[in-house]
Image (spheres, rainbow, N blue to C red):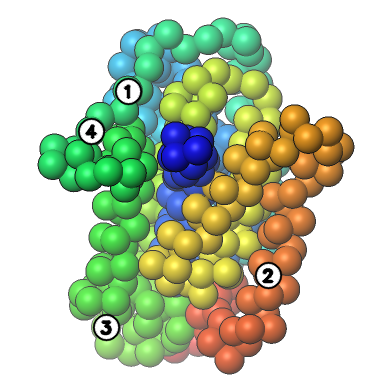
Amino acid sequence: MQEIIISVLQRTIVAGTPLLLGTIGGIIHERSGILNLGIEGMMALGAVSAFITTLLTGHPALGMLVAVLVGGASALIHAFACITLQANQVISGLALTMLGIGVSGFWGKPYIGIPLEVKINKFKIPVLGDIPIIGEILFYQDIFFYLAIFLGLGTWFFLMKTRLGITLRATGESPKAVAAQGLNPSLIRYLATIVGGAFSGLAGAHLSIAYSKSWIEGLTGGRGWIVVALIIFSFWNPLRAFLGAFLFGGIFVLQYILQPLGISPNFLSMLPYLATLLVLLFSSIKGARHMASPASLGEIFRKEDR
């Protein structure tokens, strides 16, 4: 029984890792005031670019790097549209999702069904990995999990404890006030959006070279939209993102656990998205006083309005 529990929790962590990476990235750019509904598209681009690079070069680290660059570059398109061209952020994000899914499907078509021979192995952290049960679950994972934990905690520290992080949060609340201090809100938003996109690209890389180890169209499976919900569920707090990401990771694993019980596959496939709606409903009721988004989220900042 203990082995089953450990196995389920290990798989939960693996399934929740890309959600955590995407959510942390989303928190970064939304804290600056940029709404990005293109996370699904950026994850898809990151997934296909990481898979192709790893397949052709045999180096997963290079695949991860390319995914980060592609994710950041795709986010740059969104930033240019929303900040420089002052386009509607919702429309731009939706367009980015469609672009990402379409381009990833085109790029990945020749590679459908080709297995990835290079594996990203798990490794045990000395001492901590020897702790009974906990060590096997938390300290015997692959590089993506450790990166997600490090980046998540680092993002929390940056946003809450550093001057630059406070400036970024202030930009999301009142870009006019930031501009009045002689700073450039547009530059801050550009950087935050690009970094957030890089996180999404890395999340996509996890799906293709660590989670499934293959490429198929629709590999992201709507996880980008779940990430959008998790950003709200976390109240734009990186620490709460951990809870949401691994909670939904457990829901993904639950699908496979319930399959032998004869439950409808269609219902099981619907579970993560049904849970998304329930979580958003619960968040809006339970934390209505505390879930206020950044005051200027989605709003266009014009220099002449200062």
Provide the secondary structure element on which disc 3 rests. loop
* Quadrant in which residue 222 is drawn: top right
Question: Where is 197 relative to 46, above or below?
Answer: below
Tell me the tag on residue 124: 4
Q: Are marks 2 and 1 in contact (CB under 8 Å)?
A: no
C-alpha separation, residue under disc 2 versus residue under disc 3: 38 Å
What SS does tag 4 mark? strand
**Amino acid type of disc 3?**
Gly
* Residue at the image position 20 percent from the left and 39 percent from the top: 130
- Reading the image, the residue beneath label 1 is 121
For the residues bearing labels 4 and 1, Cβ distance under 8 angstroms:
no
**Residue 191, horizontal then vertical, whole percent:** 36, 59
Residue 137: % across, % down: 36, 42
Left or right? Give the position of 54 relative to 12.
left
Between 112 and 35, the residue placed more toward the observer is 112
Query: Residue drawn 77% across and 41% down?
Result: 268
Q: Can you tell which of label 4 and label 2 is closer to the viewer?
A: 4
Three-letter code for the amino acid on which mark 1 is drawn: Asn
Q: Name the residue under label 2.
A: 280
Point out the frontmost of discs 3 and 4.
4
Residue placed most toward the observer, 253 or 3: 3
Residue underneath mark 3: 182
Identify residue type, mark 4.
Lys
